[in-house]
Image (cartoon, rainbow, N blue to C red):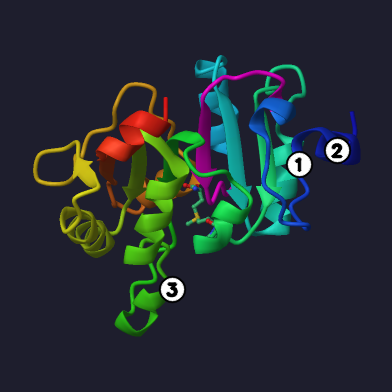
Amino acid sequence: MNLEEKRAFFEIDVTERKLLDFKEIFGNDNQVFLEIGSGMGEFLRMRSLINHNRNFIGIEIKEKRLRQIVNNMDVERHKNVRVMRLFVDEAVTEIIPEGSIKHVFINHPDPWPKQKHHKNRIIQDKFIDTLNKLLKRKGIVWIATDDEEYAKWIVEKFSKREDFVSMYEGGFSRLPEAGHIVTYFEEMKRKEGFDPYFLKFRKQCSLENLVTQD
Ligand SMILES: C[S@@+](CC[C@H](N)C(=O)[O-])C[C@H]1O[C@@H](n2cnc3c(N)ncnc32)[C@H](O)[C@@H]1O
């Protein structure tokens, strides 16, 4: 199968910014796991094999990386994966239905280390509101970063909220959990001597959510 044929299978066209129907896309009701900033696609490629009874959506803004992700997947083995080219921001709920995602993974988000660039970081108060909207009841946000200052920034932002609780004492762990996939950026940073910080936040539910979501 050539790249164009693979793209036709794996890629969801979001140019019209219409709300997706995951049951129609995957042909089943399985839980949906979302990865934001899929890079070279290691997480999608490997985690989808481990959790073959889950559906995976990968979002990546860079065209070249999206091509690479698709090229390295196999239509049979990765039939539970779809990707889309999109810059994720608060408007992502125009495309991904609210309350439709069980786990969100953000592996090594760009750290934007300079103070004047912190506004470009994906983790912002308003974006945490968006994560809350995307997640199902008790849904989980998993974040890995090699940048200590960004890890602490993220912990501080989540710790101020009542709608999320950290699943790690002190806000992060330095040890990966079972099933952890080492991505390209994690491997590169480990070689440079930077071990990742792992962060994990669970959505807390209001009474209203208990009634309206499964
Ligand atoms: C540092 S790389 C990490 C890639 C991969 N997750 C890994 O761990 O190897 C960050 C990736 O996120 C993508 N990205 C950054 N901001 C994004 C956004 N708002 N929406 C979609 N993709 C984004 C970049 O193009 C890049 O591929």
State the separation of the CA atoms marked 3 and 1: 26 Å
* Sequence-first tag of 3 and 1: 1
Classify 38 as above or below 27: below
For badge 1, the amino acid type reads Glu
State the residue at coordinates (56%, 61%): 91
Left of 14 or right of it: where is 115? Answer: left
C-alpha distance separating marks 3 and 2? 32 Å
Q: Over which residues does the magenta segment extend? A: 26-39
**Residue 188 has which mark?**
none
Q: Residues within 10 Å of mark 1 (few under 14, many from 20)?
A: many
Residue at 27%, 46% (x, y): give it.
195
Q: For mark 2, does the 10 Å Cα neighbourhood hold few (<14), some (14 to 19), or many (20 or more) residues? A: few
Which numbered disc covers residue 8? 2
Q: Amino acid at mark 2?
A: Ala
Q: Report, in whole angstroms, how far the alpha carbon at label 2 lies from the one at label 1.
A: 6 Å
| Residue annotated with mark 1 | 11
Quarter of the image for residue 92 reads: bottom right
Which image quadrant: the C terminus?
top left
Using the rendered image of the protein, determine whether residue 95 is visible from the camera's viewpoint.
yes
User: Which of the numbered marks, if any, corresponds to residue 120?
Assistant: 3
